[in-house]
Amino acid sequence: GQQLNQSPQSMFIQEGEDVSMNCTSSSIFNTWLWYKQDPGEGPVLLIALYKAGELTSNGRLTAQFGITRKDSFLNISASIPSDVGIYFCAGRGTASKLTFGTGTRLQVTL
Amino acid sequence: SAVISQKPSRDICQRGTSLTIQCQVDSQVTMMFWYRQQPGQSLTLIATANQGSEATYESGFVIDKFPISRPNLTFSTLTVSNMSPEDSSIYLCSVGGQGAGQPQHFGDGTRLSIL
């Protein structure tokens, strides 16, 4: 099935640095969601975006719904070791089902 | 958000056997979904489990291989039939997502290894 292009594929950063990742699609979506998956667990919802141009924050996380409705980005400020994990974007069109991005693996060093 | 419980959490199975995975939600939900996550990969939707009707399968997934039940608004099962090593994956149940402002939430998944 279709997957969204997510970049970068992986990041290795130092604690305290800011992180930015993005997701692009050839299709228009009405909803963008960002999830984090830790080893041995299911994806946990971080941020949900419902309108083009919307900018939403959740603590140190900020995400934006692209104005074209074909992209979204996620920023993490002042990263900490527990930010380690795999981040997935997901888009939803007119149907209820989600299309997932390829994932960004984040590793944080002290 | 709804609490989603999956059983079993993991299993090791023999080639050619079948395994049924259960998904229980602590509240009534309209939409339930089953995803597969192959090793090191992203999530791919297998099917939407509809209460009172046949599941809706995505391209590449068929009912004979992945039969699904949805007897009520809080429970669903996914069976992985006639398993082969290629079926080794994490299988995830998800709920929610109907209508605007309704994000999907996931269970912790079932880690399946086929020998």
Image (cartoon, coloured by chain):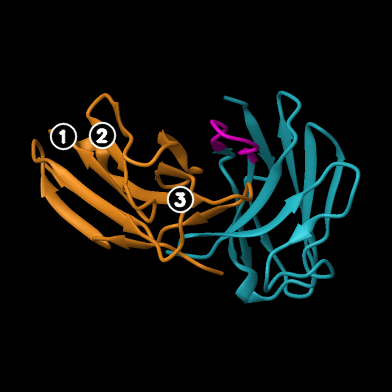
Chain colours: A orange, B cyan
Tell me where residue A104 appears, x and y as whole percent. Answer: 30, 56
Is residue B102 shown in magenta? yes
Q: CA–CA distance between discs 1 and 3?
A: 21 Å
Instruction: Look at mark 1 in the image and give the residue it sits on.
Output: A77
Q: Is disc 1 in contact with disc 3, using a CB cutoff of under 8 Å?
A: no
Residue B60 quadrant:
bottom right
For residue A108, say whether it is visible. Answer: yes
Amino acid at dot 2: Thr
The answer to which of marks 1 and 3 sits earlier in the sequence is 1
- Residue at 51% in and 43% down: A42
Q: CA–CA distance between discs 3 and 2?
A: 15 Å
Read off the chain for label 3: A
Which quadrant of the rendered structure holds the C terminus of chain A? top left
- Residue at 26% in and 38% down: A83
The answer to which of marks 3 and 2 sits earlier in the sequence is 2
Q: Give the range drawn in magenta.
A: B95-104
Closer to the camera, B4 or A92?
A92
Residue B105 quadrant:
top right
Circle 1 sits in a helix, a strand or a loop, which is it? Answer: loop
